[in-house]
Image (spheres, helix red, strand yellow):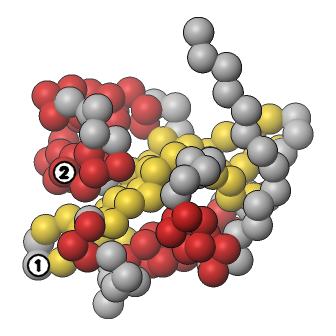
Amino acid sequence: MKQVKVAVNDDEIMKCYPIMRQLHPHLVEESFVTQIKKLMKEKFYLLYIEKSSVVVAVSGFHVCENLGNGKYLYLDDLVTDAKHRSKGYGKALLDWIFAFAVQHKIRQVVLDSEVQKFEAHRFYLQNNMKISCHHFSYFT
């Protein structure tokens, strides 16, 4: 059974760092806990799954609200350790997130995925997510 846990203390947050860094290589270990705690003040949740006391998958999301979507869940991060992919960990996290959304009367779960991440797109589509918009960015 893949038990999803919510990271709440420094040790749990830090255990998620090696996997989160696979998705975001720019992250700095020494500031990771501080960054996550800052995000948590803004309705951010950090989830993880362990196998034999080692974190194998993590996810981060915000509960948000705006005029267009109402209350929604923005899925910031979803990553499974490269050695543990295709074993159901990502699906377990996504299922937990969908259940959280239903339980909290959140209208939709949304995410952005870089255009070249075809495997991720296939995973999201297989899990009943739809491509609903294009995301545009302007960098200064």
Q: Which mark is residue 89?
A: none
Residue position marked by numbered label 2 in the rendering: 18
67 versus 13 height, above or below: above
Q: How many marks?
A: 2
- Please state which of residues 19 and 37 is positioned toward the viewer in this rendering: 19
- Residue 135 left/right relative to 20: right
Residue position marked by numbered label 1 in the rendering: 52
- Residue 87 left/right relative to 100: left
**CB of mark 2 within 8 Å of CB of mark 1?**
no
Instruction: Determine crowd level at label 2: few under 14, some 14-19, many 20+ residues with C-alpha closer than 10 A.
Output: some
Instruction: Determine crowd level at label 1: few under 14, some 14-19, many 20+ residues with C-alpha closer than 10 A.
Output: few
The quadrant holding residue 103 is: bottom right
Query: First in sequence: mark 2 or mark 1?
Result: 2
Q: State the residue at coordinates (13%, 68%).
A: 54
31 versus 139 height, above or below: below
Q: Residue furthest top?
A: 140
Percent of width and height locating residue 100: 58, 66
Q: State the residue at coordinates (55%, 74%).
A: 123
Secondary structure category for the residue under label 1: loop
- Residue 136 left/right relative to 96: right
Q: Residue furthest bottom?
A: 1
Q: Which amino acid, mark 1?
A: Ser
Q: State the residue at coordinates (48%, 42%).
A: 44
Percent of width and height locating residue 65: 74, 39
- Please state which of residues 63 and 123 is positioned toward the viewer in this rendering: 123
- Please state which of residues 52 and 105 is positioned toward the viewer in this rendering: 52
Quarter of the N terminus within the rendering = bottom left
Q: Which amino acid, mark 2?
A: Pro
Q: State the residue at coordinates (70%, 69%).
A: 129
Answer yes or no: is residue 27 visible: yes
